[in-house]
Image: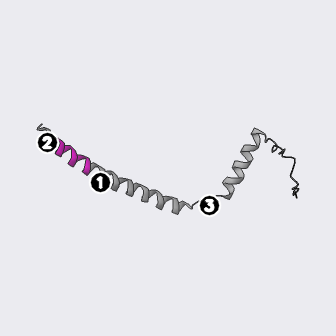
Amino acid sequence: MTSHVKRGTGAKSAPAKKSRLAFFPEVVAELRKAHWPTRQEALRLSLLVLVVCTVVGGILFAFDSAFAALFWQIIGG
C-alpha cells in the first residue's frame, strides 16, 4: 500500500519588489508610532546620563591612576 500525499508545486512566488522611494513613507509611519518623551522627561534623562557618565568616568580615572602608580612602583621609575 502506498500513500499519496498531495504536495504543492514547490514553486514559491517572489514577493513584489518595493520601490526604493517607498522606504521613506514607511520610516515616517514608524516614527509616528514611536513614543516621544516630553521636554521634561528628555531633560531629566539627559541629566541622568551626564551624572552616570561622570561617576563612571571618575571611577575609571581612580582605577587608572592607582594602576599607573602601582606600575611605576613595580618598575622603579
Distance between mark 1 and mark 2 Cα atoms:
23 Å
| Amino acid carrying mark 1 in the image | Ile
Q: Is residue 5 covered in magenta?
A: no
Residue 24 drawn at (x, y percent): 72, 44
Residue positioned 68% across, 56% down in the render = 32
Residue 71 drawn at (x, y percent): 18, 42
Q: Earlier in the sequence, mark 3 or mark 2?
A: 3
Q: Earlier in the sequence, mark 1 or mark 2?
A: 1
Residue positioned 52% across, 59% down in the render = 42
| Amino acid carrying mark 3 in the image | His
Distance between mark 3 and mark 2 Cα atoms:
54 Å
Mark linked to residue 59: 1
Mark linked to residue 35: 3
Q: Which residues are magenta?
A: 62-71
Distance between mark 3 and mark 1 Cα atoms:
34 Å
Instruction: Identify residue for label 2.
Output: 74
Q: Quadrant of the C terminus?
A: top left
User: 10 Å neighbourhood of mark 1: few (<14), some, or many (≥20)?
Assistant: few
Q: In the picture provided, is 73 more to the left or to the right than 13?
A: left
Callout 1: SS? helix
Viewer-proximal residue, 21 or 36? 21
